[in-house]
Image (cartoon, rainbow, N blue to C red):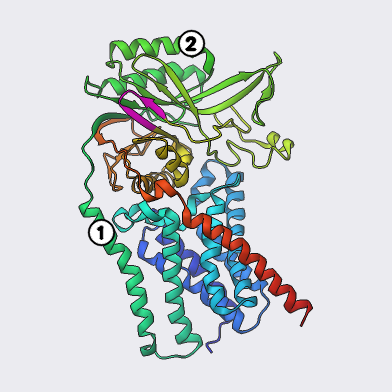
Amino acid sequence: MIQLTKKHRFLLSILSGLLMMVSYPFSGSLTPLVFISWVPLLFVESYISKKNYRSGKVFVHAYIAFLVYNLGTTWWVWNADPVGATLAFVLNSLLMALTFYAFHLAKKYIGEKEGYLSLLFYWIGFEYFHYNWEMSWTWLTFGNTFSIRPSWVQWYSYGGALGGSFWILLVNLLFFRTVQNIYLKKESWKIQTPIFYSIAFILLLPISISVYTYYNYQENEKPIEVVALQPNIDPYNEKFDTSSFPNQLETLISLADSLVTESTDLIVAPETALSANFNEADVHALDFFKYFKEQKQSKLENVPWYIGASTYRLYNKKHSRASRLQNDGLFAEFYNTSMLITENDDVEFIHKSKLVPGVEVLPFSDIFPFLEEMSINNGGTSGTLGIEEEAQIFELENLKIAPVICYESIYGEWVTEQVRKGAELICIATNDGWWGDTPGYKQHLSFASLRAIENRRSIVRSANTGTSCFVNQRGDVSQATDWWEEDAIKAELNLNSEITFFTKYGNVMGRSFAFASVLLLLFTFVKRFRKKYMS
């Protein structure tokens, strides 16, 4: 057996983290390397197991690998919030390492073959679980790695991003099996031929099917004309300054006026484009709205607007944990809001539901209310925001829209709920200026391609600053705007009402694997208990 010193083991763990990092979009974008990125870490785990070293060593090496991955791909979060970034790096790496450690325990107490199979169940179960709790940070779901390679993953309309994670792990396990056989079991290269065939088949078949689908996919012709705005407002020093709000509103009107014609069906503006907090019940009486309506009628052909806003509602009693008692005895609940202004100047509101941990929601503050005092100021409001309890859509006479605000675009199954309710077009309103000119806003943009493929829906993306764009139903990005530039873009997008397998059934793999992983974990602990106390 090959001998690995402590130094070698740590270097291999770091190598795994680096391979994961450089394969990730805009942290290297060397996508093929993701298929071998787990091999060094798996090799270290196997060596520790063969040597009967204590299991804690596996956790340490896994934590190092995943910390490198987290730091290398999402370091830019530090620009927006150093404390939140530190917690994200530390806790997300911890959860990943614990998941890998659970695989090691299954391998140790159930059996080697069963253990390697358990890695697939544990990891997909973990990623699914990570989509569905208040500490959710799904940015680094491994299936997101292919967001810049839409031609590789047209089959996401069946399996979604978790299907991509499964694919990555399966290929890595086969590559590792070869390395293990040669360097730990001292087998010859020739004996590995069946494994090489398996790798080629599992690696190339999905890509081949996807590329064929990509070049043969035809959108149904049902065009609408959409204008997307990028006002380019500094989120730190200007956007939430109430004195600059009239100028911001004028910028939006001017940008829209530059492209809108009588053929335009929809104008899309970014997250919190209407940044001054206002009571939703009073919207028609507010001076800014009267001005906005006047300009819409006189200059903008009465075209409907989908626009982000900061709003609140008043309640006579506490409505949710987000409700805050005011001096007048009423309870106010603040929202990050999608706002639809119809041709007839009717106004509808839908509130963001997938909130950013630590900024828009204080995890577990319903259990520990004092945590609300630790909240981060978010453009004039702080503490947990109110949410919609279920996915909602906007309906116009000729159009049904899925309103997606910023962070929500990471959640594939959430978007499918909107599409199942009839959405024919996905509108993403976001403000990516918090992170600066970093990989962050580029990664965020790329995830839109996955949502387009999963649901076969065109997407219009309006960002406060770079990147605004359009995405077609096979995931291609067009008319991408530049960073830190005021801009407006226009395109014809095809609506679609057909439902994909993934839209209809959601994360079937995630739900199934999550359930199986719980049973597997319980079985592992039973086996561990028997071995420890009954042998």
Identify which residue, 510 or 83, lies in the foreground: 510
Residue 397 among magenta residues: yes
Secondary structure category for the residue under label 1:
helix
Check the image and report above or below for 310 versus 25. Answer: above
**Kind of residue sitting beneath label 2:** Leu
Q: Is residue 446 magenta?
A: no
Secondary structure of the residue carrying numbered label 2: loop
Please name the residue shown 50% across and 56% down the image: 510
Vertical arrangement, residue 232 with respect to residue 52, above or below:
above
The image quadrant of residue 163 is bottom left
Q: Residue at x 41, y 59 (%)?
A: 164
Of 33 and 121, the residue lying toward us: 121
- Range drawn in magenta: 394-401
Residue 170 appears in which quarter of the rendering? bottom left
* Residues packed near mark 2 inside 10 Å, few (<14), some (14 to 19) or many (20 plus): few
Picture disc at residue 211: 1
Q: How packed is label 1: few (under 14 Cα within 10 Å), some, or many (20 or more)?
A: some
